[in-house]
Image (cartoon, helix red, strand yellow):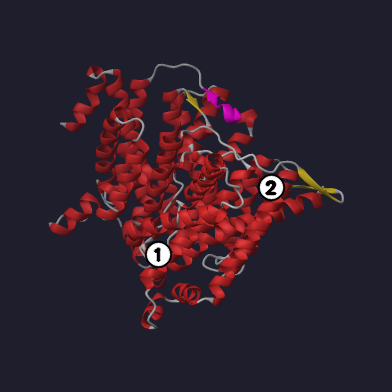
Amino acid sequence: MVGQVVISGILAGALYAMVALGLALIYGVMRVINIAHGPLLMLGAYTTFFLYSAFGLNPYLSIPVTMAVLFVVGVVLQRSLVFRVVDAPELSSLLLTFGISIGLVNLAQLAFTSDLRAVEYLTGSIPLGPFALSKTRLVAFVFAGGVTALAFLFLQRTRLGKAIRATSQSPEVAMVCGIDVRRVHMFTFGLATALAAAGGALIAVIVAIQPEMGQVWTFKSFLVIVLGGAGNYPGALLGGMLLGLVEQLAALFLTTQLSEVVAYLLLVVVLLVRPTGLLGGRQT
Amino acid sequence: MLLAALAVYPAFGTGYGVRAMLQIFMWIALAGSWNIISGLTGYVSFGHVAFFGAGAYAGAILIANAGWPWVPAAAAGGVAACVLALVIGYPCLRLKGPYFAIAMLGLNEVLRALVSYFEALTGGGSGLSLPTLHATVPIYYAMAGTAAAVTLLTFLIITSRFGLRLMTIREDELAAEAMGIDTARHKLYAFLLSAAGPGIAGALAARDQGYIEPISVFPLATTITMIVMALFGGKGTVWGPVLGAVVLFVAQELVWARFPYVHQLLFGAIIVAVVLLMPRGVLGILQLKYRLPRTI
């Protein structure tokens, strides 16, 4: 039983890590905690749903399209609103992104109604020794791992990726070095939104889609980046796995309802012992 | 004049009018309380509705299960919120900046999960019904008293040395510590004071509505509403939260009636507008333009 739970935790963890990496990027580069991250994930899920129901596009093949669409949405949001609260006190950015968040949820309710929707694509599970692996979750793990790896490769190897990391280390020095910080901000927000969208696309196949599905993901992503150390990108991987494991173990030994409580207690303890997160204090 | 008018209003007002006034008092108490911790010390409590919900559940449980009258139950709601603030504030107030905001946000989610889980005591997700009682008018006065008490408390704090120390923490916590201010203790006191009002208001609101459930007393939107009210009026001032609560509540009532479908969208737009256009709030702007007393 514990083995099964550990596997489920790791499968979920990769998804958490990918979505949270987006939030971590925005926080690292702009010092903005984006409450709208979850609702943007919700838009990604809807995009995949409509590509599937209207054009019959395979939900997994739709991931690049969904990411591209939400990348544009993210850039537009950054250019129009979020750029005003970059480096502002946290109250401004929290409230602004909360405003965007309820705006997005309300728009989704108006446009798509509150009906539950589902992408029924892969069902059932694969037996693996004594364990049973849900197909959709296994595929989500593979895709989330792949996208996260690509994102890291991008951050490590490309000029733009290096510019993003430089900006998150020190915006002033980055500017002096000739990096167009405003462009980096735009691109980072787009990239982060695309990561959330990829999460949405993968989740669309696993759970029901509805306008309010996103909020819980904002909070989970917070947990992940705080556990890993905000602004520390590999920390998101560790945090994601940890959150996945803790949630599954809590669900096994207590009940599913209390898994959130256990995750929160973990967060408070980690913050008290290591206020900068498990891998914090060391920027990539 | 205004006080007298408010005092005799229940005798003349319509049922809707009295209820709306009661809501305004509640928002004044909530926005004013948030202002005490966040407006004065700069620690953004992003889950202040947790104290409202804790008070609501404490009061409702005492009324429904223990048969308490509502007045002591409301006081107990305030005490329960203070106890929660003590337990949470002691560790969490050591967190800086966004970490504290997130910890408070999480606290709210956790309380909602806990309340849903302990069904025997709280009725779980299906909620808790209170025995029927027609006491809107006495509750009107109690809520008005709570709002007045919170505003008076804010005035007393701002004009005291204690308030000055809190504002020093807001401007520069390190400097405050270097000057010999016991910052941890001061933050905790401010946090306790800011929890009592929402606790009492929560218990009163629960009694007034006669029914509570986890999603109705722990919504993040309530936290945001109180923050935006305080921000709109002017955070860190005495009358800012009052002004914000009155103006935004009236605006919200008008909008709610006319545009039920897009009202959330408009709420979002108001938040964005307040943050971008007037982060100092009405009183803050007036203070910049004219030389107003700092204690306004």
* Magenta highlight on residue A77: no
Amino acid type shown at disc 2: Thr
Q: What residue is rendered at 73% in x and 49% in y?
A: A249
Dot 1 surroundings within 10 Å: few (below 14), some, or many (20 or more)? many
> Which span of residues is magenta-colored?
B123-129
Label of residue B6 in the image = none
Q: Position of residue B66 (x, y in %)?
A: 57, 24
Q: Position of residue A235 (x, y in %)?
A: 60, 66
Asked whether, in this view, residue A12 is left or right of residue B149, the answer is right
Q: What residue is rendered at 41% in x and 43% in y?
A: A102
**Given the current orientation, which residue lies at the most extreme bottom position?**
A177
Chain letter of the residue carrying label 2: A
**Given the current orientation, which residue lies at the most extreme front position?**
A55
Q: Are marks 1 and 2 in contact (CB under 8 Å)?
A: no
Dot 2 surroundings within 10 Å: few (below 14), some, or many (20 or more)? many
Q: Is the residue B194 above or below the residue B69 in the image?
A: below
Q: What residue is rendered at 46% in x and 59% in y?
A: B98
Q: Are marks 1 and 2 on the same chain?
A: yes
Confirm whether residue A222 shows in the render.
no
Residue position marked by numbered label 2 in the rendering: A136
Residue position marked by numbered label 1 in the rendering: A186
Q: Position of residue A231 (x, y in %)?
A: 51, 67
Q: Is the residue B51 above or below the residue B40 in the image?
A: above
* Magenta highlight on residue B126: yes
Amino acid type shown at disc 1: Met
The front one of A52 and A112 is A52
The front one of B258 and B9 is B258
Q: Secondary structure at mark 1?
A: helix
